[in-house]
Amino acid sequence: MGDGILLVDEQGSILYENTAAHQMRELLEGTPGERQSIEALLRVPAQHVLGKEEVKDVLVQLVDKHGEAREYAVSASLLPLPLVPILSGSSR
């Protein structure tokens, strides 16, 4: 499985995910620790980054819905906002 990439907003809502990230989330669905797993993979790293803390290659160990233990290296960073608003439909 390749690198999972998620783009989340300040509230932790998923704005974008690639195929690998979607597959990782699917493996956690229906597990007894699903909520805690999602917190560890998404919301906690996002909160740390928003608090100006670096999140790079933090190891997170989870058990998927098949009972297999998996280890993920989680990194998170802020994306800079564009300085000029992007106008849709603009023909400049």
Image: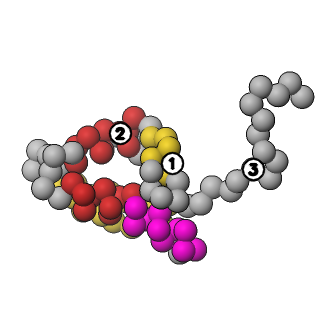
Residue at (78% x, 35% y) in the render: 87
Residue stretch rendered in magenta on the structure: 43-52
Report which residue position mark 2 lands on: 22
Which amino acid does the dot numbered 1 rest on? Answer: Leu
The quadrant of the picture occupied by the C terminus is top right
Q: Secondary structure at mark 3?
A: loop
Q: Classify residue 44 as left or right of residue 76.
A: left
Give coordinates of residue 23: x percent, y percent: 31, 38
Marks 3/2: CA–CA distance:
27 Å
Residue at (15% x, 51% y) in the render: 31
Please, which residue is most extreme toward the left here?
67
Give coordinates of residue 2: x percent, y percent: 39, 41
Q: Nearer the viewer, mark 3 or mark 2?
A: 3
Give coordinates of residue 35: x percent, y percent: 24, 57
Residue 32's place in the image compared with 14, above or below, is below
Report which residue position mark 1 lands on: 7
Q: Residues within 10 Å of mark 2 (few under 14, many from 20)?
A: some
The quadrant of the picture occupied by the N terminus is top left
Who comes first in sequence, dot 1 or dot 2? 1
Who comes first in sequence, dot 3 or dot 1? 1
Marks 3/1: CA–CA distance:
16 Å
Q: Secondary structure at mark 2?
A: helix
Pointers 3 and 2 in contact (CB under 8 A)? Answer: no
Q: Classify residue 92 as left or right of residue 43.
A: right
Report which residue position mark 3 lands on: 82
